[in-house]
Amino acid sequence: MKNLIENTVEFVKEKLEGAEAGHDWFHIERVWKLSKKIAETENCNQEVVELAALLHDIADPKFHNGDETLALKVSREFLESQNAGEELIEQVLFIIKNISFKNRGEVPENLPVELKIVQDADRIDAIGAIGIGRTFNFGGFKNNPMYDPHVEPKLNMSKEEYKKSNGTTINHFYEKLLLLKDLMNTEKGKEIAAERHDFMLKFLDQFYKEWNVD
Ligand code: ADP
Ligand code: NI
């Protein structure tokens, strides 16, 4: 019999067939690999980490009429079909439920280390060169302007200010991407995020330089 991780890989690949580019199988694969890398440096349940990484975007509410329970339902059904134990299922579902950036501030304290790991991995995939690529891809899909030179970019923009800024792709860096490195939970996550953060700052410098034809 094939093992649970391999079966999950197969299941997720099939489920994400035709998914949009920001959350396709390759995003999952990167988050899975990053999670494993971080897990090596933490005392944790490796199986829980891998399963949660693989299943974390299985049914994004954005693409399912805001249904936040669907991912949990789909994951539970799959894990039950694999005869996974109830304790393992609960641990994995807890991570899928609480991983999202938008839940920051609302999550309970003393989070399980497995959640911290997968959350770091998912956030790391939103920054650096890949993060820049995903962000411009998303902005292009929405037909957003890349940049508005009349809006001065600043960190920690509120949702209101962000809306006023026309939702440019460059502003997404200030609204979200440049904040992520300080939200890392693990030491390894901080280390990886720091390098990618620096790369984004260099990118922005160069972007403004080229924009202004300096
Ligand atoms: P996540 O899956 O991390 O919760 P989202 O679904 O919000 O992220 O976004 C998917 C990708 O698109 C991410 O890389 C994110 O940074 C990017 N993105 C989200 N909102 C915007 C935006 N308004 N402009 C440009 N990129 C965005
Ligand atoms: Ni994700």
Image (cartoon, helix red, strand yellow):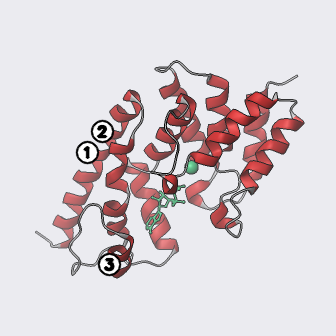
Residues marked 2 and 1 touching at CB (< 8 Å)? yes
- The relative height of residue 83 versus residue 109 in the rendered view (above or below) is above
Q: CA distance from mark 2 to mark 3?
A: 28 Å
- Label 1 secondary element: helix
What amino acid type is highlighted by mark number 2?
Glu
Disc number placed over residue 165 in the picture, else none: 3
Measured Cα–Cα span from mark 2 to mark 1: 5 Å
Q: Relative to the observer, which residue lies in front, 95 or 16? A: 95
**150, 85: nearer the viewer:** 85
Q: Please tell me the numbered disc located at residue 50.
A: none
Which of marks 1 and 3 precedes in the sequence? 3
What residue is shown with label 2? 195
* Quarter assignment of residue 115: top right
Mark 1 = which residue? 198
Work out whether 128 lies above or below 147: above
Q: Residues within 10 Å of mark 3 (few under 14, many from 20)?
A: many
Mark 3 to mark 1 CA distance (whole Å) = 24 Å
Q: Residue at x 73, y 46 (%)?
A: 13
In the rendered structure, the answer to whether residue 108 lies left or right of residue 72 reads left
